[in-house]
Image: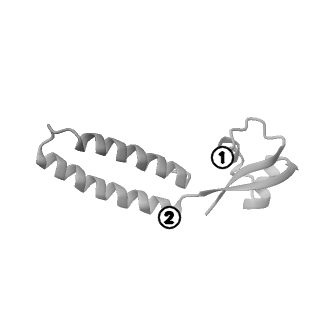
Amino acid sequence: DFTTENDIKEVQNLLDTQFDYVMDNNNVPDTTIQALKNLRVEVTKFLEQEAVNAFKVSTIETPEMPMTLLCFQYYGSVDNTVLLLDLNNTIDSSFVEGTVDILTL
């Protein structure tokens, strides 16, 4: 499962790099190349659909406040507190301030 649009882009870039590597290999049979191209089309469709429902990362400025309060202000619950802590590489949830990344649809 993907959480953010950035997660999807990361996977897409990795798959594109691997695809290009295989395509540069002259020893790959034509049938395999065609099968990989078809698979790439299907994977791209899947990732595009996943991106529709994935969160976008937005940056905000906030005065000092508990991350739980910030979560509640943006989402109406504290359910995403751990997700926001991870997104901001923050371990201590007691207070955050300044530039903070949040998730939006």
Q: Quadrant of residue 94?
A: top right
**Vertical placement of residue 9 versus 48, above or below:** above
What residue does disc 2 label?
52
**Vertical placement of residue 31 versus 105, above or below:** above
Q: CA distance from mark 2 to mark 1?
A: 19 Å
For the point 82% across and 53% down, which residue is it?
A: 62
Name the side, left or right, on which 22 lies relative to 94. left
Q: Tell me the SS state at disc 2.
A: helix
What residue does disc 1 label?
83
Structural crowding at the residue carrying mark 1, measured as other residues with C-alpha within 10 Å and reported as few (<14), some (14–19) or many (≥20): some
Q: Depth-wise, is mark 2 or mark 1 nearer the camera?
A: 2
Q: Tell me the SS state at disc 1.
A: helix
For the point 25% across and 41% down, which residue is it?
A: 22
Residue 1 appearing in the image = no
Name the side, left or right, on which 21 lies relative to 59. left
If the image is split into quadrants, where does the C terminus sit? Answer: bottom right
Q: Return the disc, 2 or 1, that comes first in the chain's sequence.
A: 2
Residue 103 appearing in the image = yes
Indicate the position of residue 100 as horizontal and vertical percent values: 74, 49
Name the side, left or right, on which 24 lies relative to 88. left
Name the side, left or right, on which 3 lies relative to 32. right
State how the image is colored.
one colour
